[in-house]
Amino acid sequence: MDLERTRLFGVGESYGFTTAAGQRGAVIVHFDGRRDIVLYDPADPERVRHTLTLEGTEPRTIAELLGLPLVMDHLTELTPPLEGVETVRLPVPARSPFVGRRLGETRARTRTGASIVAVIRDDRVIPSPDPDFVFQSGDSLVVVGDGASLVKLREVFTDG
């Protein structure tokens, strides 16, 4: 399936798609984090027939139900690009073995080489979480590392 990304000035971005059966739809990603899933009228491809609005952790829950892999959002606006260093936002899966456990138990930096520099919970940013910080379902990690270490960290939070 091909996605067509369109910037919606003052709103966010639209990711349009057409299913194998010919149904047109889109996911609208708003600047405030809200997501809308829209389905277009088959008779009039510009007319929205249905809209489903997802807020908070709802989009992540739906993604997990659909069996989608975790997606890491690149946060390029945090720092100027540095050769070999990336900053990403990594969602903690609801079924992560570290939900309800402390950061220190992950041994994340030792095991992967990536550093967890902040946690986003709901609309709050928790900078520099200490080793006693306890993860919750719906948290997102702000992580710094090279590409390989980021992949390893995602695997740690998915598989243990």
Image (spheres, grey):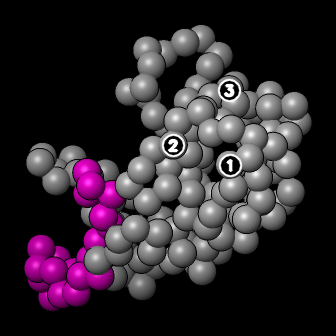
Most prominent secondary structure in the magenta stretch? Answer: strand
Q: Which amino acid does label 1 sit on?
A: Phe
> Could you tell me which residue is drawn at 81 percent across and 43 percent down?
104
> Could you tell me which residue is drawn at 38 percent across and 27 percent down?
77
Q: Is residue 103 visible?
A: yes
Q: Residue furthest top?
A: 83
- Residues rendered magenta in the picture: 30-52
> At numbered mark 2, what does the secondary structure look like: helix, strand or loop?
strand
Vertical comparison of 87 with 41: above or below? above
Alpha-carbon span between mark 1 and mark 3: 20 Å
Alpha-carbon span between mark 1 and mark 2: 10 Å
Q: Name the residue under label 2.
A: 126
Q: In this view, does 123 lie to the left or right of 141?
A: left
Q: Name the residue under label 1.
A: 133
Asked if the residue under mark 2 is in contact with the one under mark 1, i.e. CB atoms within 8 Å, the reply is yes
> Could you tell me which residue is drawn at 42 percent across and 85 percent down?
21
Q: Nearer the viewer, mark 2 or mark 3?
A: 2
Q: Is residue 89 visible?
A: no
**Mark number displayed over residue 51:** none
Q: Mark 3 points at which residue?
A: 145
